[in-house]
Image: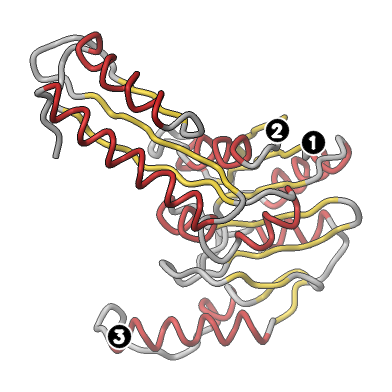
Amino acid sequence: MVNVEIITVGNEILLGLVQDTNSNYLCRVVRGMGGRVCHITIVRDEVNSIVEELKASISRRADLIFTCGGLGPTDDDLTLSAVAVACGRQLALDSAAREFVERKYIELASAGYVASPKMTDERLKMARLPEGARAIENRVGAAPAVVLEAGAVRIVSLPGVPAELKAIVEGPLQGVLGGIFGRGSYREREVTVECNDESQLAPALRQVAAANPDVYIKSRASSFGPDVTFRVLLSASATSAEKADAMIQRASADLTSALLNSGIPHP
């Protein structure tokens, strides 16, 4: 079994300003691909703190380490510097990463989201990777993800913005994850159901689960009350992204039908 550790980086999380949803999502991905998350930690935006956690993960013989956050252009984005130190590498400007970042800023400038596409030192910072690492495209943001093999461990550094992280994991990173886990893809979908009584919802979920035994289905609500809505999570893993997507689509269609037949509205 593949042993995985997750290191989330960010003062804003430790200050309680932002909730760490990335670790929760990655746990589901790892579980769905047949791996096991053994350790999760949150550290400050400090090189020494990140290095310490990376070395601890390596010493525990983790097969895969995810880092989340700290890949951006500002001075407190220090994850790649820490990865380089922990693995005894130097940071160097990577041509593929530079090409990606440059292309992103041209697109952003053309759309009017930034004033200029010029490659400043701050933007070039996102293209400086530990020697031997490779960039993974970020289809949502401007900072690429980074994969580094360091002996027996693989370190995957992901951006901290959840939408960016999820798009990378479910897109360009699939080949890397398939090679590590030897299995296919994980997909999930969340449906909001306008029902304030889980006991009323249960028969519909039971019906959908019986028709889709390979899809994990779970309803969640925080309390009782007239305005409570339930979130129903559908998740599945399969030998390919296409198969996982198809499983989720079938289960979603079955859920829509079951809710309709039960008189339970949902968006």
Please give the name of the residue rendered at 69% of the width and 82% of the height, measured from the top-left corner: 93
Q: How many marks?
A: 3
N-terminal of the pair, mark 1 or mark 2, is: 1
Q: Nearer the viewer, residue 177 or 111?
A: 177
Please give the name of the residue rendered at 45% of the width and 42% of the height, measured from the top-left corner: 12
Q: Is residue 5 left or right of residue 117?
A: right
Q: Which residue is mark 1?
A: 1
Q: Which residue is mark 2?
A: 36
Q: Which residue is mark 3?
A: 115
Instruction: Report the Cα–Cα distance between label 3 and label 2.
Output: 44 Å
Q: Nearer the viewer, residue 212 or 119?
A: 212
Mark 2 element type: strand
Q: Residues within 10 Å of mark 1 (few under 14, many from 20)?
A: few
Q: Residues within 10 Å of mark 2 (few under 14, many from 20)?
A: some
Q: Is residue 93 left or right of residue 76?
A: right
Q: Nearer the viewer, mark 3 or mark 2?
A: 2
Mark 3 element type: loop
Please give the name of the residue rendered at 62% of the width and 51% of the height, measured from the top-left corner: 239
Name the amino acid, label 3: Ala
Give coordinates of residue 146: x percent, y percent: 66, 65
Give coordinates of residue 248: x percent, y percent: 40, 44
